[in-house]
């Protein structure tokens, strides 16, 4: 069994649409070189970590070598190739989104459904939770949000 852990934090932006888990929501999104999907970025780092690979920035640096505004679902697809995902069984994904900018619970079902499709796993193994920062710091001031992902992989 392999355990992976990843996290990502981005500043909010009123110039981009919110994308979480590859799902578009009609509200303020995140600054970033890509589409700013903090959940997918954290997921990629967790997958890379579980399989002993380098971090996401190694494969997709925030510079001209990575296309500007690249969809994070495309990044995930390429990371699945890097880790040879077909050789593993994803047993569990636990996701926490720390924010005071939006309500995670309202988005949870769509996120889980989309991640299930992207990863080819049952809905039941994906858990999404929302937490606040109790009005403290960058997250409490609604300037940024954070995604944390832990997962368990088993060799197929």
Image (cartoon, rainbow, N blue to C red):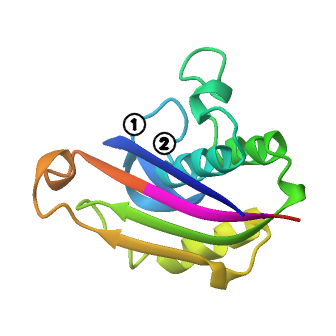
CB-based contact (under 8 Å), mark 2 and mark 1: yes
Q: Disc 2 designates what residue? A: 36
Q: Is residue 84 left or right of residue 2?
A: right
Along the line of sight, which residue is nearer the eye, 47 or 35? 47
Q: Quadrant of residue 45?
A: top right
As measured in the structure, the alpha-carbon distance from the residue carrying label 2 to the one carrying label 1 is: 6 Å
Residue 103 in view: no
Marking on residue 31:
1
| x and y, in percent, of residue 17 in the image | 44, 50
Residue 108 in view: yes
Q: Residue furthest left?
A: 135
Compared to residue 148, the image places residue 56 above or below, namely: above
Q: Quadrant of the C terminus?
A: bottom right
Q: What residue is rendered at 67% in x and 44% in y?
A: 48
Residue stretch in magenta: 148-154
| x and y, in percent, of residue 43 in the image | 58, 53
Q: What residue is rendered at 36% in x and 52% in y?
A: 146
Q: Quadrant of residue 52?
A: top right
Q: Is residue 49 left or right of residue 109?
A: right
Tag 1, which secondary structure?
loop
């Amino acid at each position: 069994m392999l355990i992976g852990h990843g996290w990502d934090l981005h500043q909010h932006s009123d110039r981009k649409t919110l994308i979480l888990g590859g799902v578009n929501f009609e509200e303020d999104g995140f600054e970033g070189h890509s589409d700013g999907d903090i959940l997918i970025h954290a997921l990629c780092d967790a997958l890379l970590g579980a399989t002993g690979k380098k971090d996401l920035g190694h494969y997709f640096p925030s510079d001209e070598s990575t296309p500007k505004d690249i969809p994070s679902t495309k990044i995930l697809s390429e990371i699945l190739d890097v880790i040879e995902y077909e050789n593993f069984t994803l047993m569990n994904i636990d996701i926490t989104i720390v924010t005071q900018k939006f309500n995670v619970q309202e988005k949870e079902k769509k996120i889980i459904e989309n991640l299930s499709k992207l990863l080819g796993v049952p809905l039941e193994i994906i858990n999404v939770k929302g937490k606040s920062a109790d009005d403290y710091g960058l997250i409490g001031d609604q300037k940024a949000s954070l995604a944390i992902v832990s997962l368990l992989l088993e060799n197929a």
